[in-house]
Image: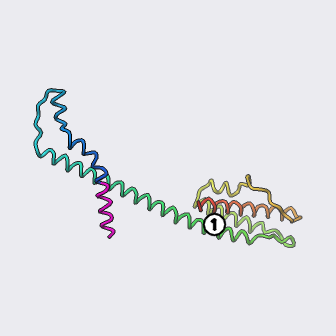
């Protein structure tokens, strides 16, 4: 069945391109030579067959090229979609890891080293998968609203803001990749 569908698409592509041949089939190019340059030339009968065959071969090649380019485009979109899904799944795992740092317990030491290690792993993955511009955006807090905190200790407040800003950026990247 797929073979017939492919053959049908190829024939449709050929028919779409045959309009290039219609003017040459209905007009005699040697008539122009005779009118304008006073050259009297009788074209051989085999020339029509050769030109028609050449036109059909060109139409087949163009139809094949169009179908092949559509296939390449679809494969690329499918590959991009698969890649985006993998990236989204990994970012979701990082998001879950980062959420484990919150809420921060003031009675304990702030998890600065663990949070920075987590952020560095996320940044490394972003660099590999999406590029340096995502890493820069990941560490940039501009455009994010300041978070409300109930922590009294400045070191705890700083690490909480650091984690929440990184989590917000990951959520922003997930939203971008879904669209």
* Residue neighbourhood size for the residue with mark 1, other residues' Cα within 10 Å, grouped as few (<14), some (14–19), many (≥20): many
The reply, left or right, for residue 3 in relation to residue 24 is right
Q: Which residue is outermost to the right?
A: 152
Magenta highlight range: 1-13
Relative image position of residue 52 (x, y in whole percent) = 20, 48
Question: 9 and 26: which one is in front?
Answer: 26
Q: Which residue is outermost to the front?
A: 26
Kindly indicate the quadrant of the structure image that contains residue 138: bottom right
Relative image position of residue 13 (x, y in whole percent) = 32, 55
Quarter of the picture holding the N terminus: bottom left
Quarter of the picture holding the C terminus: bottom right
- What residue sits 62% from the left and 55% below the top? 132
60 shown above or below 117:
above
Q: Secondary structure at mark 1?
A: helix
- What residue sits 73% from the left and 64% below the top? 116
Relative image position of residue 77 (x, y in whole percent) = 48, 60
- What residue sits 33% from the left and 60% below the top? 9
3 within the magenta span:
yes
74 within the magenta span:
no
- What residue sits 16% from the left and 45% below the top? 48
Counting the numbered discs, the total is: 1
Q: How is the image coloured?
A: rainbow
Secondary structure mostly taken by the magenta-highlighted segment of the chain = helix
Relative image position of residue 8 (x, y in whole percent) = 30, 61
The reply, left or right, for residue 4 in relation to residue 25 is right
Question: 85 and 20: which one is in front?
Answer: 20
Residue at which label 1 appears: 91
The reply, left or right, for residue 33 in relation to residue 148 is left
The reply, left or right, for residue 14 in relation to residue 123 is left
């Amino acid at each position: 069945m797929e073979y017939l569908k492919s053959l049908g698409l190829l024939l449709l592509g050929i028919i779409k391109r045959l309009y290039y041949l219609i003017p040459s089939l209905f007009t005699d190019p040697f008539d122009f030579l005779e009118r304008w340059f006073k050259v009297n030339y009788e074209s051989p009968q085999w020339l029509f067959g050769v030109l028609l065959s050449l036109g059909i071969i060109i139409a087949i090649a163009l139809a094949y090229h169009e179908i092949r380019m559509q296939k390449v485009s679809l494969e690329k979109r499918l590959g991009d979609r698969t890649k985006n899904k993998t990236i989204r799944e990994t970012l979701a795992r990082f998001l879950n890891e980062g959420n484990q740092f919150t809420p921060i317990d003031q009675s304990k030491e702030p998890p600065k080293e663990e949070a920075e290690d987590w952020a560095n792993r996320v940044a490394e993955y972003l660099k590999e998968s999406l590029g340096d511009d995502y890493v820069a955006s990941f560490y940039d807090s501009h455009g994010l609203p300041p978070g409300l905190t109930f922590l009294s200790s400045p070191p705890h407040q700083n690490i909480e803001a650091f984690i929440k800003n990184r989590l917000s950026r990951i959520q922003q990247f997930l939203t971008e990749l879904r669209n």
